[in-house]
Image (tube, helix red, strand yellow):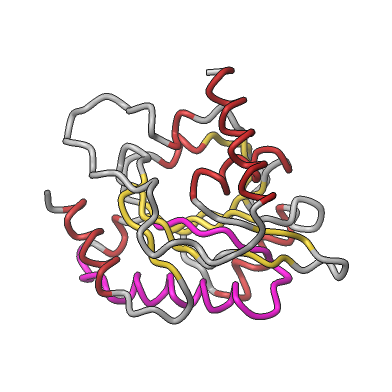
Amino acid sequence: MRIITLTLASLAIAFLQAGCSTVSETPSCCLKPAESGQPMSDHSLFQLDSTWTNDQGADMKLGALGGPPLVVTMFFAKCEFACPVLVHDMKKIQAALPEDVRSKVGFVLVSFDTDRDTPLVLAEYRKIHELPANWTLLRGTADDVLELAALLGVKFKKDARGQFAHSNVLTVLNPGGEVVHQQVGLNQAPHETVKQLHRLLHP
């Protein structure tokens, strides 16, 4: 696992050096959903050793989120433009799901801002944006954020004002923590993402 982590960290650095250009519409990282009952694959994000802190101040591994399909995006609380739209796009996905499966999908926001986005700040963000219990807000160390961003195909760079230029990507993870779909850009129609989630819930 140590070798894997070092490799992922190197990949993350390469992403930053490449700048913050738009992510490809067909990310090469995307995998087919794992068959039910399969062991966790080497492509699972749940294999990461990183420890994250949620908005309640509790430490957790990404593997603790395993079970339901997940919609994951990276953001920061003081974002002035893109992040509120990303959160709105996630809410559109949630609203478009049939009512009987809506609570069976998890939504995860992971902050870029390791300095300012404390658990208290994230808790306030949850309150302001009225995010329900099946939403998880996380912060981590700079290295762990860099590593996760690389695996999600998200590029970001902090400017002198403390804002982040970043890719706008919503990622669907299957119950085994593998990337199976990505929605790239802002204000996108949720239909394809909803379809992918429905397939995961009704294989």
In this view of the protein, which residue sits in the foreground, 11 or 170? 11
What residue is rendered at 57% in x and 64% in y?
167
In this view of the protein, which residue sits in the foreground, 2 or 195? 2
What residue is rendered at 39% in x and 54% in y?
27
In this view of the protein, which residue sits in the foreground, 36 or 22? 22
Residue that lies at the very extreme toward the front in this rendered image: 18
Please say if 174 is above or below 163.
Answer: above
> Which corner quadrant of the image does residue 125 belong to?
bottom right
Please say if 37 is above or below 183.
Answer: above
Q: Is residue 18 left or right of residue 94?
A: right
> Which corner quadrant of the image does residue 188 belong to?
bottom left
The span picked out in magenta is 71-100
Question: Where does residue 51 sit, x and y in percent of width and height?
Answer: 62, 34
What residue is rendered at 53% in x and 23% in y?
4
Residue that lies at the very extreme toward the top in this rendered image: 2
Residue that lies at the very extreme toward the right in this rendered image: 160
Question: Where does residue 140 sit, x and y in percent of width and height?
Answer: 68, 43
Question: Where does residue 162 sit, x and y in percent of width and height?
Answer: 83, 66
Q: Is residue 48 magenta?
A: no
